Image (cartoon, rainbow, N blue to C red):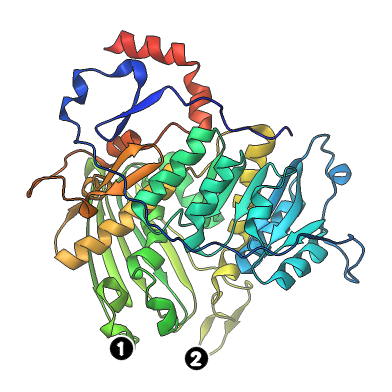
Amino acid sequence: MRQTQRSPSPLPYTITNGKLHPYCALSNKMANFKTAVISIICAGTVKAFSPTPLKSISRYESSDVPLYMTAEESGARDPVKVGVIGCGRIGIVHLGAINKAPGVVPVIVSNPTVSKAEDAAKKYGVAKFTSDAMEVITDPEVDAVWICSPSQFHADQIKACAANGKHVFCEKPIATDLAETVEAINACNEAGVKLMIGLQRRFDPNFLRVRRAIEEKEVGDTIIVKTCSRDPAPPPYEYVKGGGGIFNDMAVHDLDMTRFLVGDDPIEILAVGSCHIDKSIEDLPGSEAFDTASCIVRYPNGVNAMVDVCRQSSYGYDQRAEVLGTKGMIATDNVYPNTAKIYKNDYTGNADMPFDFFLSRYFEAYVTETEAFCKSLVEDTPVPCTGIDGLVALVMSLAADKSAAENRWVKFSEIIDQVYCTSPTECVLLAESDLFPAGFKPTGDLITDANDLILPDVDKQKEAGTFFDRFKKLVGSA
């Protein structure tokens, strides 16, 4: 596969009052847009991984049976060559799936602890390994990069991939900051490379079956959606401290799932939180002090979604969804290691508890999402989870946090309207600027405002046709 190159000329879009517009489409409609602010980009960012010399190994150095598929074995004449950043638990799951996907070949892996990268390379027959993520990103062989590094490195690595013309799969979140999220998405869209976000629950067969029931009206029109997420045991204090709170590091998955199931964009949210399990976290700020939380999300047509999360469940990993419709109800059960049941005079039920680890519970989903991105690369089709999906998930979690802090309903447009861009890749949060007068209240809706901030991705650019096609469409609708 020929490596996608960064476009030598800018896309036919300009920034006016902080919004993206085609050069030819500027009109009186701009009058209501916000005044531009100067971009503020945090200085002194931590370098993702310290470099060490690139090393190569033979596929046959390991005494283990190598778990890999060569280009010849995959039957691909021109395979997509990929690199993986991060050889921790998630990275290894993705690497294993990449090896089994037709038409895709891993050629380099990295990890800051280089021994982990070396072990992964030997196990999966990858020719090169390194401790430096940038050596993956700049490798001339690599067409696409899987980013499975810690969250604080995601945005910079996405931008670096875009600058080097590499397609990107990135584990959630895109960034820990909303403005950086917009910048990272736009960097990919401006460079014309694919960006897929890892929202693995969307690929779980149980939730997919519920989604299909909604789409095919098996239970009629949707009235209420419910999801719950309850972990087997609370994480350590060190994990919770500085983690962004229960809405950002836990409930975000369920909030995204409600949007996925409803099939529409949310309007507003009401959230509350409390601490019942681990009293040691009560001294932490904001929603980091919560180990239990509930949300109500309002969607169009009167549809409501209810989410509850808790950091401890005495009976295993509890992950369920339920949809009530006008003609019936569909619900999922938990996933168990086996289907064995015990029948006794004092107990009847499953012989074992549900899976108690997220990788066990969602292993199939992780593999399926990896295969989906591989297919998108090989067949050049749209990715199933876009940058916008990752952006909206973050917006929903931030709105939940704000709702719990202020004890009120929060519109999602309030969150997205905090981002202001002077260029597609230079954005700032309005809260960091004093250029707006006191009492300034942006108005709009979530997706409209998000689309104002985000350039069309590479697949939408293809669907839209040439610049002149878009120009004629815009002039015709003016």
The residue where tag 2 is placed is 346
At numbered mark 2, what does the secondary structure look like: helix, strand or loop?
loop
On screen, residue 472 above or below 430: above
On screen, residue 303 above or below 42: above
Looking at the rendered image, the disc whose residue lies closer to the viewer, 1 or 2, is: 1
User: In which quadrant of the rendered view does residue 422 lie?
Assistant: top left
Query: Which mark is on residue 462?
Result: none
- The front one of 240 and 208 is 240
Query: Residue 18 appears at what percent x and percent y?
Result: 27, 35
**Residue drawn at x 50%, y 15% as measured from the top left:** 466
Q: Residue furthest front?
A: 44
Query: Which mark is on residue 279?
Result: 1
- The front one of 164 and 390 is 164
- The front one of 227 and 18 is 18
N-terminal of the pair, mark 1 or mark 2, is 1
Measure the alpha-carbon separation of dots 1 and 2: 35 Å
